[in-house]
């Protein structure tokens, strides 16, 4: 009886030991199997996972692009230059080409600026016309130079640069009378402080005098006075110490 009891007790003890050891092992194995099975299923289901273009339900989602600093690019306002800013840019480029002596290119930029400049900007318009006139002057296109100076002065009548430039262009065209009017206005506006303009005005006066003389002699014969007129004229200076000698010398000259 005791042997049977001991045998039963030993069997029971072994069974409990096996159960205590086997159950955890079985649980670990079952967990490992589930892990690998789940991982395998996740790989198969990866294309259906939510992405940047799909939500959890698989619907398409339009996402706005982001700029590098994380700000929505659609909310970034791009600065659109105003007409005045565009005009200033064309003027700047025209001045740069003028400095490089690319006068044709400078004229093109000034013309673009003029076409966009608001009519209310009289000062800017006048400057652009004067700048283009300067480029025309460098190309010896004096007619267009005068025309642009006319437009500049129509907007700003006391624009000294335009007056001076037109005076010089008119001189090249042989219109000394109008050139003298322009350069005289410049000298007066400068209160006679600009020496080069004063010297230029003097040269215009001489050129105008010569032109008038040539024009006069074309239509009038230039005759010297008679000997009798000269003698009587000189005798009119009764107190002149040379009154007795000079007329006799003059009468012996070749004057006829």
Image (spheres, helix red, strand yellow):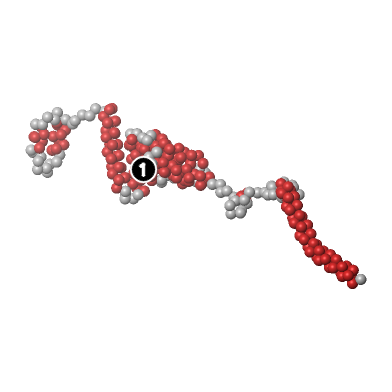
Q: In terms of image quadrants, where is residue 172?
A: top left
Where is mark 1, residue-wise? 164
Position of 160 compared to 252: left or right? Answer: right
Q: Which of 143 and 207 is in front in this view?
A: 143
Crowding at mark 1 (Cα within 10 Å: few <14, some 14-19, many 20+): many
Determine the residue positioned at 27% across, 27% down. Answer: 218
Q: Where is residue 13 shown, x and y percent of the image? A: 84, 68
Determine the residue positioned at 9% across, 41% down. Answer: 242
What count of labels does the image hold?
A: 1
Judge whether 232 appears above or below 5 on screen.
above
Q: In terms of image quadrants, where is residue 30?
A: bottom right
Determine the residue positioned at 58% across, 52% down. Answer: 68
Position of 118 compared to 249: left or right? Answer: right
Q: Quadrant of the N terminus?
A: bottom right
Position of 43 compared to 103: left or right? Answer: right
Q: Where is residue 190 shown, x and y percent of the image? A: 35, 49
Q: Which of 124 and 32 is in front in this view?
A: 32
Determine whether the residue tagged by mark 1 lies in a helix, strand or loop: helix
């Amino acid at each position: 009886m005791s042997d049977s009891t001991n045998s039963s007790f030993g069997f029971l003890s072994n069974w409990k030991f096996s159960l205590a050891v086997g159950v955890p092992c079985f649980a670990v194995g079952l967990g490992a199997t589930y892990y690998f099975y789940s991982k395998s299923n996740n790989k198969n289901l990866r294309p259906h996972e939510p992405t940047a273009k799909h939500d959890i339900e698989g619907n398409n989602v339009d996402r706005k692009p982001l700029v590098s600093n994380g700000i929505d690019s659609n909310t970034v306002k791009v600065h659109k230059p105003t007409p005045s800013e565009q005009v200033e840019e064309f003027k700047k480029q025209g001045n740069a080409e003028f400095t490089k002596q690319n006068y044709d290119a400078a004229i093109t930029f000034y013309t673009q600026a003029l076409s966009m400049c608001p009519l209310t900007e009289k000062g800017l318009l006048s400057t652009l016309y004067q700048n283009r006139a300067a480029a025309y002057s460098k190309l010896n296109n004096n007619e267009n130079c005068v025309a642009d100076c006319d437009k500049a002065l129509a907007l700003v009548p006391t624009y000294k640069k335009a007056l001076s430039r037109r005076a010089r262009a008119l001189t090249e065209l042989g219109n000394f009378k109008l050139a003298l009017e322009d350069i005289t206005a410049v000298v007066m506006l400068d209160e006679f402080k600009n020496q080069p303009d004063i010297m230029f005005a003097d040269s215009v006066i001489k050129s105008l005098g010569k032109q008038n003389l040539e024009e006069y002699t074309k239509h009038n014969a230039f005759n010297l006075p008679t000997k009798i007129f000269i003698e009587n004229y000189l005798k009119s200076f009764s107190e002149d110490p040379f009154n007795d000698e000079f007329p006799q010398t003059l009468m012996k000259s070749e004057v006829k």
